[in-house]
Amino acid sequence: MRKSEPLSAPQHQEQSMASIAHLFVYLAFFLVGVVFLLKVFSGRVILVPARKVAVVERLGQFSRVIKPGWHLMSPLVESIRTFRWSYTGQDGKPVNVVEYFVSTETNTMDVPPIECISRDNAMVTIDGRVSYKIVNLEQAAYNTDDILNLLYTYAVQATKQIVSQNSMQSLLGHDVTIGQSIAAAVNARLGVSGSDAKPRGIVCEDFAIQSIDFDEEVLKKNQEIGAQTRQHELTRQRAAAEHETVMEQLEMARAKAAAEQSAAYKAKQAELELQKLEAIAESERRAAAWRVMLGAGFSVDQIIRLENVNSIRQVNAKCKTRLVVVPHDFIDKMSPTAIAGLLGGDGGGSSGGAKQRIATHDSAAAVAGSD
């Protein structure tokens, strides 16, 4: 076996340099591989912050929405969607928003002053702030290119619409009510039903009015008109109160008159009832008298004549007259003493004098007495 010859110093140095060069080449390839692996697997483990969500896309298409916490993604296939939104800021300049993670809480967006025209043709400038909340990130990401710009546009349109429906006077001191009306109009444009935004995935929770500016001259004029309106309203209320008082008095008078009429009616009814009872008592008295006279041997004809005489006496006493109408045949059968008694006399005098005081007719006779 042939032994290798020892290397010379230059050869040994050259071999050492070649080994070192090979080592550096291997190390370079290793570092390139590590960098490549880090590049491939970088971002595959995602940490979503608290109160935020993100959209994962697979090959450029929507895959899922991930919630707060650690999430593992498929390399080279899945990626986090980047949201690029913009709107006009308070100073009128565009505000660009770039986000990977979207907040699930209520956010605010300042709206620059909006010039509107009220119902009474007054120029009104409203400075407000929109409070919104994204409730469906998938719809907010894919149904609209720029959801914040759309929200800003709808806020401006809704503000002009609500202001045009109100007068300047109605806008003063009603910031909260006007803001609620503007928020409702924005949600109507976004297609919000209740708390779910189906088409857009976003809800306008409130429109806070920071300030409402009017033209000073028009404002002063409207304040004067408002004072006159309030004065007229007070006058109308006083007139209504007076009218109500008069109506109450009239109603009380009607109730009193009705009570008095009812009392008079009841008194009349009581009087009629008393007369009825008196008539019944009189009938019973006469029936008893008839039974007594029949038992004493009087004939029916005699009893009837006595009844007639008593009746004529009662009429004569009530009417206070000395002229009494009696049946014709009854006079012929009466004695002078009976006629005198009928006239209220003592029965004295001749029968001729009594006869002279009798005036007859075909069916009746008049008996007159002299003072």
Image (tube, rainbow, N blue to C red):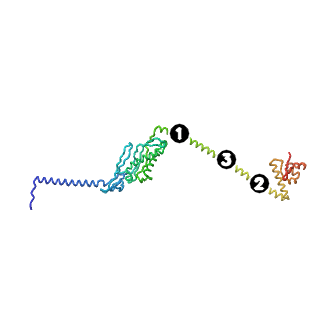
Q: Alpha-carbon distance for marks 2 and 1? A: 75 Å
Mark 3 or mark 2: which comes first in sequence? Answer: 3
Q: Which residue occupies the foreground of this view, 356 or 8?
A: 356
Q: Residue at x 47, y 37 (%)?
A: 217
Q: Which residue occupies the foreground of this view, 104 or 134?
A: 134
Q: Farthest front residue?
A: 121
Q: What residue type is labelled 1?
A: Gln
Mark 2 or mark 1: which comes first in sequence? Answer: 1
Q: Mark 3 points at which residue?
A: 257
Classify 10 Å Cα crowding around label 1: few (below 14), some (14-19), many (20 and above): few
Left or right of residue 301, residue 268 in this image: left
Q: Position of residue 371 (x, y in %)?
A: 86, 45
Q: Alpha-carbon distance for marks 3 and 2? A: 33 Å
Q: Alpha-carbon distance for marks 1 and 3? A: 43 Å
Q: Where is residue 136 in the image (x, y as percent from the top left)?
A: 39, 53
Q: Are marks 2 and 1 in contact (CB under 8 Å)?
A: no
Say what secondary structure mark 1 lies in.
helix
Instruction: Specify the quadrant that holds the N terminus.
Output: bottom left
Q: Which residue occupies the foreground of this view, 236 or 291?
A: 236
Q: Position of residue 267 (x, y in %)?
A: 71, 50
Query: In the picture shown, does residue 15 fall above or below 117?
Result: below
> Disc 1 or disc 3, which is closer to the eye?
1
Q: Do the residues labelled 1 and 3 touch (CB within 8 Å)?
A: no
Q: Which amino acid does label 3 sit on?
A: Ala
Query: In the picture shown, does residue 302 fall above or below 165?
Result: below
| Circle number at residue 279 | 2
Classify 10 Å Cα crowding around label 3: few (below 14), some (14-19), many (20 and above): few
Q: Mark 1 points at which residue?
A: 228
Q: Farthest bottom residue?
A: 1
Say what secondary structure mark 2 lies in.
helix
